[in-house]
Amino acid sequence: MQSEPGRFHQIPGLAAPGVWRPLVGVVLLVVLVFGGQLVLTTVAGLILVLGGLDASTALDRLAGDPVTPIFLAVVNLGWALAIPAVFLVLFALHRLSPGWAASVAGRMRWRWMLACFGIALAALTATVLVSTFLPNQGDASVEISGSANQWSAQTRDFVLVVLLLTPLQAAGEEYAFRGYLTQATGGLLSPLGNKVAMAGAVVVPAFLFACAHGLGQDVPIFFDRFAFGLVAGTLVLITGGLEAGIAMHVLNNFLAFGLALAFGDMTEALTPTDGSWWSIPVTLTQSLTYLGGCWWMARRMGVADRGRVPVLERSVARV
């Protein structure tokens, strides 16, 4: 099979050219993910009803206000479905194996991801230190002062859901936004030049990622999520894969949910509404520390930002 060199955002377009492919791919991905989430919610409701709850109580448990363990589990599993959905779209439309959704190496680079977890831990430590010297940052940052929450059966259930399913949720969001949406945007904008395609491949998924967390967000909260998307998207291009974004996303969610379970409230942690501009210095500390750390480590480890992508025969690819 033939191959061509390219960056992460160019992979599907190199494998099987055609503007229609990323357009159809994005629509198909949305249908698969949200369709799967609807099925999951329905199944969870049936399980609750068969377990002895009436329909009204079951709906309340799955409504998300307040957040319950079963609701969090459904949300996490719903986003985890993005991983096989991206695999299916890449294969069906671009004839690519699942590994090309992860990196330019055609696989997940586990050694590099392990290093990213270490850098993410350092960045989060710096973030917590900076936040302790600033005024209240609102719901976007969980307060760790005051007394700890009491341990309960619900707390136990939340801990199990967070530990077992949150990594899948974080990875699913990265595969969707920094994975296929980055590649689709890069492919759609490629006729405008590589610089425009690269910029769009970072900015557009970051904006959609922030919007996906709720259109009624306060500006500081939206900025926090948009900034995360920009950093993760930039790292996809300069490191050639999703590993850095996944590592930061997983640890960021672990910290937010862990502090919420210990000192705060899970509903506010999952759907913050009260933002503060004092969260911006905290966001910038995390973003710049992590971006700089990953860039430095990637150079030391020789992490590739390009790979040779398998391509279809041109007689087939130009259909």
Image (cartoon, grey):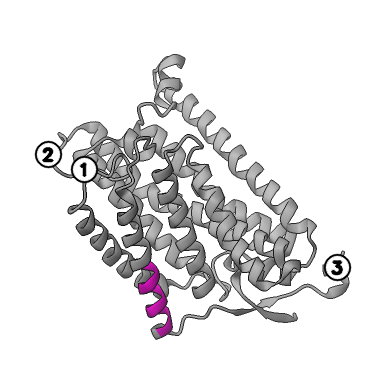
Is the Cβ of the residue at disc 2 closer than 8 Å to that at disc 1?
A: yes
Say left or right for 187 vs 243: right
Q: Position of residue 12 (x, y in %)?
A: 69, 66
Q: Quadrant of residue 59?
A: top left
In this rendering, the answer to whether 109 lies above or below 173 is below
Q: Circle 2 is placed at which residue position?
A: 146
The one nearer the camera, 198 or 84, is 198
Say left or right for 14 vs 179: right
Q: Circle 3 is placed at which residue position?
A: 318
In this rendering, the answer to whether 199 lies above or below 128 is below
Question: Going 49% across and 25% down the picture, which residue do you hit?
Answer: 46
> Label 2 vs label 3: CA separation?
63 Å
Q: Quadrant of the N terminus?
A: bottom right
In this rendering, the answer to whether 1 lies above or below 86 is below
Residue type, mark 3 in image: Arg
Q: Residues within 10 Å of mark 2 (few under 14, many from 20)?
A: few
Callout 2 secondary element? loop
The one nearer the camera, 152 or 241, is 241
Residue 26 visible in rendering = yes
Residue type, mark 2 in image: Gly
Specify whether residue 92 is painted magenta.
no
Of callouts 2 and 3, the N-terminal one: 2
